[in-house]
Image: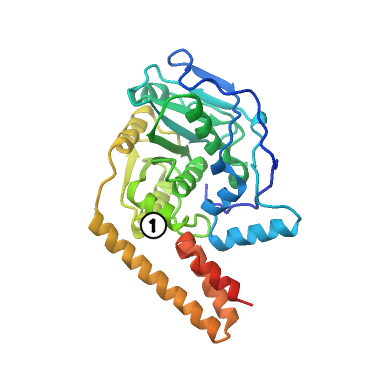
Amino acid sequence: MRPFAHRRLTLACSALLLCAQPAARGAAPAAGQTLKDVTFSRYTERSDNAELARRLLSPLAAARLKSDVARSGSALTGQPIKLADERFIVYIPPQRPPKGFGLLVFVPPWDDARLPPGWSTTLDHYGLVFVSAARSGNDENAFGRREPLALLAAENIMAQYPVDPERIYVGGFSGGARVALRLALGYPDLFRGAILNAGSDPIGSREIPLPPRDLFLKFQSSTRIAYVTGERDTAHAADDSMSLRSMHRWCVFNTDSQTEARAEHAVAGAAALSRALRYLEESARAEPERLAKCRAAIDAELTTSLDSVDTLISQGRGADAHKQLAAIDERFGGLAAPRSVELAARLP
């Protein structure tokens, strides 16, 4: 599965549509129970169309989308998902940890909602609730369905069960792992870590732009990323190496990579899942001096690049300025805003 670009957002209902009321917080079903065809009713601002664009698109791409939508006579508001039509699978472990359940939101490459074989034992050990959406596979739109479905799944589990906010993770397999990476990058205030199982991409690109500065600083300092790929899955192992290198270039050092012995391109087994979760459960490594030095180098490069665009505009070289600003938007994403947006407004 190769990197894919976001498709244009399909606007959905402008008003929030609610179905049955959620269960009372903490009213978990019988221990160790797998619930199928679960419906949810609670929406969150995080999954609003405008918020998705702010966090997951580059600033100039988000501005273009907003402009395109406005020309069609609409506005970039409302939710892209009608929850009453969606179905989820939920697994609740036998024992509730003292600080509440952990939560693993899983993005699949397949179309049905299922719990990977052998995972329940590991989820039990770590006290993690598992939730995954149906109709969230690789053939579905990432921006319009897969990403908001994962966010809404997390919101509804947190509303219905006691969840430790420090143990909320997102994960996926193959193409689902690529979506999980986008969510971890754009929502570090929700997801404290990610499991990328046989699917990853470099960050800081057209496909995976960096989020607004405050969110990216949080991602750098506190999000943990665990890569898990089969020993014989050489293509995706190579993707992991490229993704890891990009993480380190962008000052993201809380990463771990493991190879599952003798495994092909397949969902991680229970032991590999356990090792990944063990890493996510650790506290993020604090390397303030290394992080500060790395951030300063990025900021210096960005300032120089933006100053160059400013000069081109002042010289009346609009075409050159357009080209250079587009490259900055793709590479630096939200780190370049608001100055990149201000410069774009000065272009003819």
Amino acid type at image mark 1: Ser
How many badges with numbers are in the image?
1
In which quarter of the view is residue 291 placed? bottom left
Q: Which residue is mark 1?
A: 246
* Residue 331 vertical placement versus 53 (above, below): below
Write the residue at 25% across / 55% down.
Answer: 288
Is residue 62 visible in the rendered image? The answer is yes
**Viewer-proximal residue among 231 and 222:** 222
Q: Position of residue 92 (x, y in %)?
A: 45, 21
Write the residue at 48% across / 34% down.
Answer: 106
Q: Quadrant of the C terminus?
A: bottom right
In which quarter of the view is residue 22 placed? top right
Q: Is residue 153 left or right of residue 261?
A: right
In which quarter of the view is residue 301 placed? bottom left
Is residue 261 visible in the rendered image? The answer is no
Residue lying at the far bottom of the rendered structure = 315
**Viewer-proximal residue among 86 and 66:** 66
- Classify 10 Å Cα crowding around label 1: few (below 14), some (14-19), many (20 and above): some
**Viewer-proximal residue among 202 and 74:** 74
